[in-house]
Image: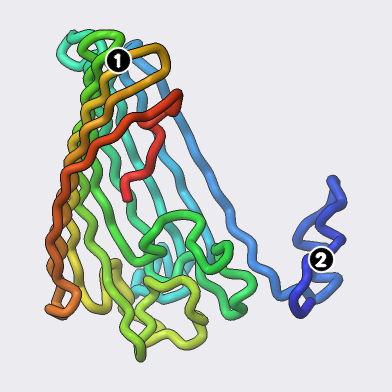
């Protein structure tokens, strides 16, 4: 195919890789796993694993940072009613994605939609730690605080270290000794605090504080900003928003 969807994939029962081989498809395939385990009534462990490409010898035996070992993983914990306090919930999460994961030699087959990453705003080549705490004081008043620490590498206009997943991975910087956060080493710290009060049925008053500090090997990427915000919300679930 040049720029269109292959109709063979609409068949609900196919041997997927056999079809790709038959039509000489250049498409990309990935394998994903996830799990969730609830125990002790109040604790949940969860995680995900994505395998894009890998070679067993390169990944397990040689372990020399081959560029084609593309994978990412997530591990997290949720603790409900922390310390025995009703409606006090804690969430801890760690994410890591190797360089060049989600990329492809064909720009039509990378893991994006309208040039936007589908998995994570940064793309790949990062590691991230997240902590969130939520507390419902009463049915009308909610608090949430969150802290994120993200370490990643930045690609500039002339390099491809595996962060920008839109770039062609055939134009990579090197084949071996690739590590997470290679490139222009950058660290971002994000802190947020939110208060939500339901003052009438399905009507909420929201107050927010956001702080972000970014330090990079390249000083032109350094930044620090913070803001206070507020508003009135009608019948919307604010707590399902993203961190970015």
Residue at image coords 18%, 36%: 193
Residue 199's disc is 1
- 58 in relation to 243, above or below: below
Colouring style: rainbow
User: Within the image, what quadrant is residue 157 found in?
Assistant: bottom left
Residue 216: x and y in percent read 15, 72
Callouts 1 and 2 close, C-beta under 8 Å:
no
- 12 in relation to 218, above or below: above
Image depth: mark 1 or mark 2 in front: 1
Side (left or right) of 93 relative to 192: right
Residue 75: x and y in percent read 34, 41
Residue at image coords 37%, 45%: 74
Residue nearest the viewer, comparing 64 with 133:
133
Residue nearest the viewer, comparing 41 with 91:
91
Residue 66: x and y in percent read 40, 75
Q: Secondary structure at mark 1?
A: strand
């Amino acid at each position: 195919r040049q720029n269109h969807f292959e109709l063979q994939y609409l068949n609900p029962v196919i041997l997927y890789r056999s079809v790709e081989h038959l039509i000489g498809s250049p498409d990309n395939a990935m394998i994903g796993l996830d799990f969730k385990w609830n125990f002790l009534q109040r604790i949940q462990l969860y995680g995900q694993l994505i395998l894009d490409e890998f070679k067993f010898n390169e990944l397990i035996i040689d372990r020399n940072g081959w560029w084609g070992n593309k994978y990412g993983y997530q591990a997290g914990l949720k603790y409900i009613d922390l310390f025995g306090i009703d409606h006090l919930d804690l969430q801890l999460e760690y994410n890591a994605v190797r360089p060049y994961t989600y990329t492809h030699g064909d720009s039509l087959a990378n893991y994006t939609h309208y040039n936007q990453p589908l998995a994570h705003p940064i793309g790949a080549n990062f590691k991230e730690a997240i902590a969130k705490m939520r507390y419902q004081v009463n049915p009308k008043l909610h608090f949430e605080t969150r802290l994120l620490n993200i370490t990643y590498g930045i690609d500039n206009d002339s390099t491809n270290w595996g962060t920008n997943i839109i770039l062609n991975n055939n134009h990579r910087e090197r084949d071996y000794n690739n590590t997470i956060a290679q490139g222009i080493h950058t660290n971002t710290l994000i802190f947020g605090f939110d208060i939500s009060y339901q003052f009438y049925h399905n009507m909420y008053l929201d107050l927010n504080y956001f702080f972000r500090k970014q330090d990079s090997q390249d000083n032109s990427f350094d930044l620090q900003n913070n803001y206070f915000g507020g508003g009135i919300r009608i019948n919307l679930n604010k707590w399902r928003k993203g961190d970015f």
